[in-house]
Amino acid sequence: MEYDLTVIGSGPGGYVAAIRAAQLGMKTAIIEKYDTLGGTCLNVGCIPSKALLDSSEHYHNAVHNFKEHGIDVKSPKVDLPQMIKRKDQVVKQTCDGVEFLMKKNKITVHHGVGSFVDKNTIKITAKDGKETEIKTDKTIIATGSKPIIIPGVDYDKKRVITSTEALDLQEVPKEMIVIGGGIIGMELGSVYGRMGTKVTVIEYLDTLIPGMDRTLGKELQKSLKKLGFEFHFKTKVTSAKTKGKQVIVEAETQKGEKKEFKADYCLVAVGRKAYTEGLGLENIGLSTDDRGRVEVNDKLETKIPGIYAIGDVVKGTMLAHKAEEEGVFVAESIAGHKPHINYNLIPGVVYTWPEAAGVGYTEDQLKEQGKKYKSGSFPMRALGRARASMDIEGLIKVLADAETDEILGVHMIGPRVADLIAEAVVAMEYRASAEDIARMSHAHPTYTEAMKEACMAATENRALHI
Ligand code: FAD
Ligand code: NAI
């Protein structure tokens, strides 16, 4: 065989799998259809969205908060082309970093669309149409996902856009309709909302970020309302069409009432679907499930021995760090190790401001399971650190087993909780009780004190600073 392992797709799942396999001594190749490595996450996902979130938050602070801090800047203005240029530089540096890591680990990079000829042969079709074939012992499918476009929505990529175009706009929209109150809608809606866009969110369900604990959706809604967001819940979009410089969106409420919305841009953010087009799965007898995902067993191996699949193209949450864990898991499994992933402890984060983050069970899930639990919360506004930085919105909620005090879920909204959630993950991996965390020293003044206080509140309602 030419290669011990070939990875198709260079997103966080694919490139991490390739590095780990190379570390373990496998002769490894990676195939990427685009010119740059890094997949959705680095090119049109996690990294560019966070770059724009940071820039727009600086602008928002300059306009709204600097004065109170005693900093007088005369009418700050948005320079969107510069903001986008900086974002592009961050993306380039990050993608170049992956290229460097491939070289460092002696991983062969092939650019082109990879498709199965048979179980051990993969054809690579380059942009210029040139075809080459490589032989491989094992393969990991890591081809990721693409945005879902709902029927009736005319996705013209100019005014009716997905996250990909929203990361590259040439002007700040006056008004933006966001279809879907999920993660992309709230993050990219925030980017433009902070720069003055009037954002209208149309959400099918009755809450924002419905995958997370309800408290977070409720609190986030309050914060985004202050930013001028308008919300329409229990409302399903049925069509979106561009007419000149306007988008007309039609929707229907759960009660059957028809509504019409108008704006200069409409962001479609109703979820993503697994991407397997052009992969030639039919040539090896592999089919996809009802949601287009590659089916795998608990070892992430398809029904064809030696062919694995990871990340957004398989079941589970569509998150970069989940894809990475699975990449390492498969590389180590192939090498004969006995790796392990605790899917319940993969944290979810929304990078709005305040940030939202959660790990473990939500309160609704515990109720469904009939589990007896205790809940302890602590508001950010009661922290000296939060008052010092003027970031007083949000709270930390800890859910613990009513009898054993073991932490079952931690849900946070507030400043830097994207980073704070790591403490909850460590605590839960080691099956800590709320009292264990309550008795550990947390530096003062830090936002982490809210975690300690919420654990005290969960243990026996003995938070100190409230
Ligand atoms: P991908 O990153 O999608 O990579 C798949 C790669 O495979 C692509 O480069 C594709 O071109 C390539 N490919 C596909 N088919 C072929 C083929 N036949 N031949 C060769 N190459 C092929 N997740 C987080 O955890 N945190 C975040 O902050 C976050 N922010 C996001 C923001 C946005 C706007 C979006 C859209 C997503 C975000 N995500 C975030 C989700 C995250 O990007 C995905 O979960 C992650 O990229 C999945 O990784 P993957 O390796 O499975 O696939
Ligand atoms: P999502 O699943 O988070 O949210 C989609 C929302 O659209 C849901 O609330 C759903 O009820 C709603 N919806 C569906 N059809 C609708 C309709 N016809 N009318 C109105 N509302 C409708 O999906 P999203 O935001 O597109 O993001 C896709 C995925 O990308 C996320 O689930 C996440 O896995 C990943 N992502 C992760 C990020 C992070 O980790 N910070 C950031 C951005 C994306």
Image (tube, helix red, strand yellow):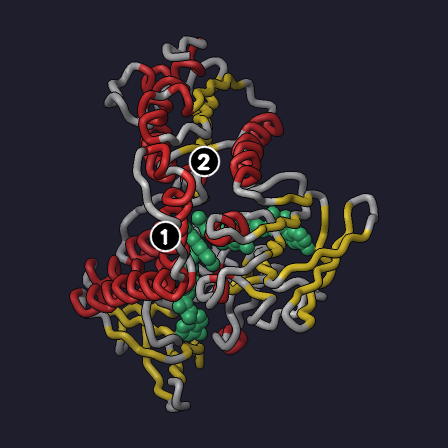
Q: Residues within 10 Å of mark 2 (few under 14, many from 20)?
A: many
Residue 46 relative to residue 26: left or right: right
Q: Secondary structure at mark 2?
A: strand
Q: Which residue is mark 1?
A: 55
Measured from the top left, where is residue 196 in percent x and y? 51, 51
Residue 280 visible within the image: yes
- Residue placed most toward the observer, 49 or 35: 49
- Which amino acid does the dot numbered 1 rest on? Ser
* Image quarter in which the C terminus is found: top left
Mark 1–mark 2 Cα distance, whole angstroms, equals 24 Å
Could you tell me residue 365's position as x and y percent? 57, 31
Q: Amino acid at mark 2?
A: Gly
- The mark nearer the N terminus, 1 or 2, is 1
Secondary-structure class at tag 1: helix
Locate residue 109 relative to residue 308 in the image: left or right: left
Q: Which residue in the structure is indicated by mark 2?
A: 358
| Residue 168 x/y as whole percent | 44, 66
- 413 lies above or below 197: above
Give the quarter of the image for residue 7: bottom left
Q: Residues within 10 Å of mark 1 (few under 14, many from 20)?
A: many
